[in-house]
Every structure is written in C-alpha cells, then in structure tokens.
Image (cartoon, rainbow, N blue to C red):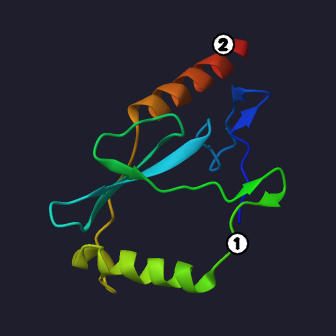
Amino acid sequence: MSYKMVEYSGRPVQKLSTGKISWPGMKQVFRRLDAVGNLASDVIGLRTDNIAGAEPLLKKVMDRGKTLRPANLEASRSTLLEEFKRLPEPVKAIRNPARYPVEFSPALQKLRAEVESNVANKN
C-alpha cells in the first residue's frame, strides 16, 4: 500500500519533487473493453469523471476507519485470474511484452496543469 496526498482541505495538491511528481485530485480508474469483452485500455481520471464506454474500477472499501465490505481472498484471486485471461496476448508475453494502454483523462490533465501553474505563480 502506498499513500500520496492528493487533496488538502478540499483543495487539490501534488508532489513536485524530482522523480516523484504526482497527479492531484481524487481519482478513479476506468476500464475500456474491446468488441468481444477483452481488456482494451484503462483511463486514470478524476473521481468525478464520466468516461464514455468505460467501467469505473475503484470501489470504496473503508469509511472513517470502518470496513465497508469484508476482504475475500478467494474472490480477489478469482477476479485477478479472470481479468488476466482477458488481457491481450502481447501484454502477457514474458519476453518483450507490449505495454497495456493507460492514459490520463482530459479533466485530470487540466487539473494537473492548473495546480502546477498555481505553484509557479506563487514562486
């Protein structure tokens, strides 16, 4: 598990240290499928984004220190195996695998540019 602050007091923030630049704002990962239901690409966007033709993947599992749904290792394992089967074969190659396409939503890119601009204007 890792933790990166993305918002403070309702204001998006980002880390700007060399080699550690982060993306501001609360995010969601959206998955696109191809015509036969295999994994086609993912989009990292803002939690408020609505990506046409894509399914949001992240689900809330804790709230204020309380577990909302119990962990189920068998269900997690089953989901992993099913998703892995749906990856394109070139991505699963052991030698020189293809990169799985991941992009950032326009809204997230815009927010990052705004936060960086605000930081630059303060300096």
Residue occupying the far left of the picture: 35
Does 26 sit above or below residue 67?
Answer: above
**Whole-percent x and y of residue 78?**
47, 83
The secondary structure type at the circle numbered 2 is helix
- Which mark is nearer the camera, 1 or 2? 1
User: Which is nearer the N-term, disc 1 or disc 2?
Assistant: 1
Please tell me how many numbered marks the rendered image carries.
Answer: 2
Quarter the C terminus occupies: top right
- 3 on left or right of 47: right
| Disc 1: which residue | 70
The residue type indicated by label 2 comes to Asn
Query: Residue 53: x, y in percent?
Result: 28, 46
Q: On the rendered image, what quadrant is the N terminus found in?
A: bottom right
- On the rendered structure, is 43 left or right of 111? left
Which residue lies at the image location 62% right of the left edge and 40% below the top edge? 26
Question: Does residue 18 appear anywhere in the picture?
Answer: yes
Is residue 96 at all visible to an observer of this figure?
no
The residue that disc 2 covers is 121
Q: The residue under label 1 is which amino acid type?
A: Pro
Instruction: Name the residue: 24% across, 68% down.
Output: 38
Q: Is 26 situated above or below 32?
A: above
Q: Residue furthest front?
A: 69
**Image point 62% across, 50% down: which residue?**
19
